[in-house]
Amino acid sequence: MSAPRFSVVIPAYNAQDTLARALDSVLAQIWPAFEIIVIDDGSSDATAAVAASYGEKIRYLRQDNAGVSAARNHGARIASGDWLTFLDADDWYYPNRLQRHGEWISRDVGLDFLTGDYEYRDTSGELLGCSMESKASGRAMLAKAADNSEVIMQEEEFEAFVADHFGDTHTLSLPRATFLELGGYPLGFKVCEDVHLLTRLVACSRRVGVVCEPLAVYSIHAASATRADPVRAQFENVRTLIALGEEATNLPAVVRRGYTTRLRQARLNLGYALSRTGSRVSAVRAVLPSLIEAPSLVSVRNLLSILRG
């Protein structure tokens, strides 16, 4: 198989303070990106000027504000590489991000997509943890890999991955053709759009390459969508997952079980968020559908936990 050509798509909205770090991290890749595409999602700050300072090293396009999914999809449509990777403007890659995936793709034509570990860091750069060790699905892959830095995730392991995935947008590599066939990221959602795509991607996959070392950094800051308004973020999380279930009605059984678990947990998180604001009745209403749709001891316990506050 010929060496993959990675198109790196970076959606940017009012990212003047962080875009340069993101771009520099892609330009510093050991395995050079085939192209770097910045989609400015209607910024009102100096994002355009930052992008312009990189000249022909990047491809810059501006669109009216339409959200991160629309920006990523726009970048994917105009990309000319055969593989896609993504990077949000406030995060960054480590130098071996593309190399680890590129070398693996070159020697294994049977991989449907690849993912990997990443770090959580705060605005001061302090390490807060790593994704794989913080998720049950990630810990299972680390145990399976033993002392190896690469491991194949297969169909029987998809349930745990869909229920609480360890890989994220900036460690995902997938064929551009697959992305376009799936329709890209869903429009109209501000939270959990990555899970929506990932679940549909897993549903049509058999072998997934997992790199068991940090390839990128996810920046934790107060202005993120999930932290600026926790209740709204949890509500949007549930809304996106319900839409996913309505759209993807023929999920394989193992993926459907993972999706059901994730939706149940999302409803519980919404219930907790509402309960902390004193909205006990709304909190109960948030988790009750899980008990009605899929009666189980777990659903009963979740409802009781909300009732007990």
Image (cartoon, rainbow, N blue to C red):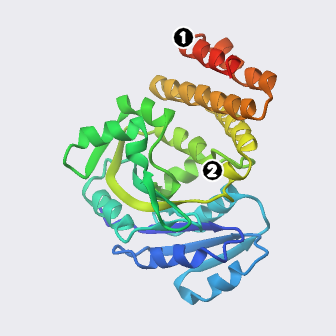
CA neighbours of label 1 inside 10 A, class few (<14), some (14 to 19), many (20+): few
Which three-letter amino acid code belongs to the residue tagged 1?
A: Leu
Residue at the extreme left of the image, as rendered: 147
Where does the image place residue 94, in percent across and percent down from the top left?
Answer: 40, 68
Residue placed most toward the observer, 281 or 144: 281
> Which residue lies at the image location 40% right of the left edge and 35% below the top edge?
136
* Residue at image point 73% right, 29% down: 275
Split into 4 quadrants, where in the image is the C terminus? Answer: top right
Whether residue 99 is visible: yes
Residue 245 seen anywhere in this rendered image of the structure = no
Closest to the observer, 174 or 147: 147
The CA span between labels 2 and 1 is 34 Å
Q: Could you tell me residue 82's position as x and y percent?
A: 45, 63
Judging from the image, what secondary structure is the residue with disc 2 in? Answer: loop
Horizontally, residue 43 falls left or right of residue 178, namely: right
For label 1, the SS is: helix
Question: On the rendered structure, is 61 left or right of 58?
Answer: right
Q: Is residue 130 above or below residue 71?
A: above
Q: Name which residue lies at 78% across and 64% down.
A: 65
Residue 179: x percent and y percent?
54, 52
Which amino acid type is shown beneath numbered disc 2?
Tyr
Where is residue 142, by image quadrant? top left
Look at mark 2 in the image and give the residue it sits on. Answer: 185
Q: Which residue is mark 1?
A: 297
Q: Nearer the viewer, mark 2 or mark 1?
A: 1
Residue 19 versus residue 116 in the image, above or below: below
Quadrant, the N terminus: bottom left
Nearest to N terminus: mark 2 or mark 1: 2
Q: Is residue 150 above or below residue 14?
A: above
Residue 127 lies in what quarter of the image? bottom left
Task: Give the total of numbered labels.
Answer: 2
Tell me the residue at 70%/68% (across/down).
13
